[in-house]
Amino acid sequence: MGGVRFITGVVVLFMALSSGVRSCPPSDRAALLAFKAALREPYLGIFNSWTGADCCHNWYGVSCDQETRRVADISLRGESEEPIFERAHRTGYMTGYISPAICKLARLSSITIADWKGISGEIPRCIAALPFLRIVDLIGNRISGSIPADIGRLHRLTVLNIADNRISGTIPASLANLTSLMHLDLRNNLLSGPIPRHFGSLRMLSRALLSGNRLSGPIPGSVSLIYRLADLDLSRNQLSGPIPESLGKMAVLSTLNLDLNKLSGPIPVSLFSSGISDLNLSRNALEGNIPDAFGPRSYFTALDLSYNNLKGTIPKSLSSASYIGHLDLSHNHLCGKIPLGSPFDHLEASSFVFNDCLCGKPLKPC
């Protein structure tokens, strides 16, 4: 009988220890509750499930590592098709700020606090000390302040998305140390100053979206060293100087948006025989002739050179491009006869208006 009681006691003790091991650590739970305390979400009840001892079990938006039971991911999106949003028939709205308590989650791999529209305050400086962080996605809030100066310490970071906020200051030089970064989205903030000179060190980068800021200075030539870069958007800034010729020699670059800057000098010949298919250079101060460098490799879904100081004639080689979908040469100083045939036969007059002396279909006869 005593043996049975002993075995029963061991089993009960083992079960208690097992359940304790499978729960998240009290320190992680406390950090999450402190994070929650800094936020206000009045409509959906996002945080109603954040109760009980085990933050790894049914806490909305929280995921844990299966082995260690440490909190690994926080994923809270204000725009989602999950049932909690469907039932409420609305998108999310949250106010408050991101508490530095989040930095006590030492095994955190991803932070997604996106599209809540009302979250303000700054990005906690301490996130740069989270060694396992791979994803930071804070798009669509009202976060202000600057990008943490030592963000370059996050050597595992693959995604940095802080678009559509109110972040100011400069892009830290240390950002160039994020050698695992694949997706960088800084669009629509208040960032100023230059693009870091060593930006080209981000060799894994496939998308660099920096539009809608107040960035100034030249486009660093080192950008062309990013051999995986497919999408580069530097539009709606105050960048100046020439367009680097080397951008047209990048292996996989397909989208290049440089519109609404203060870029000057000639258009590099290399851009027209490259793999770029969406090229927008409009609303700059580019000058000289449109290079007569189109050929079978030239394939453009969109080519916009409008609102510059381009002169001379429309190059005849444009007709030898394999495809040009949308073309806009308006608001320049072009002259002469618009060539016949493709792609000119499907273009509207709006593609050519407000030049010095262009003529021929679809404008007035020469």
Image (cartoon, rainbow, N blue to C red):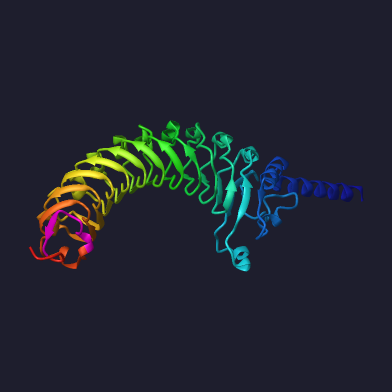
Q: Which residues are magenta?
A: 350-360
Residue 197 lies within the magenta run: no
Query: Which quadrant would residue 364 be assigned to in this image?
Result: bottom left
With respect to residue 287, does 278 lie above or below?
below
Taking the spot 63% from the left edge, 68% from the top edge, the residue there is 87
Image location of residue 200, percent across then percent down: 34, 36
Height in image: 360 above or below 224? below
Q: Position of residue 46 (x, y in %)?
A: 65, 57
* Label total for image: 0
Q: Is residue 354 magenta?
A: yes
Question: Along the horizontal axis of the image, is 200 left or right of 248?
Answer: right
- Please indicate whether residue 228 sits to the left or right of residue 326 in the image: right
**How far across and how far down the image is residue 117, in percent?**
56, 53
Residue 262 visible in the shown view: yes
For the residue pair 145 and 110, the one nearer the viewer reads as 145
Judge by depth and name the residue closer to the eye, 120 or 21. 120
- Please state, as top left, top right, bottom left or bottom right, where the C terminus lies in the image: bottom left
Q: Residue sitting at 71 percent across and 45 percent down?
A: 21
Is residue 320 in view from this perspective? no
Q: Residue furthest right?
A: 1
Relative image position of residue 237 (x, y in whole percent): 36, 43
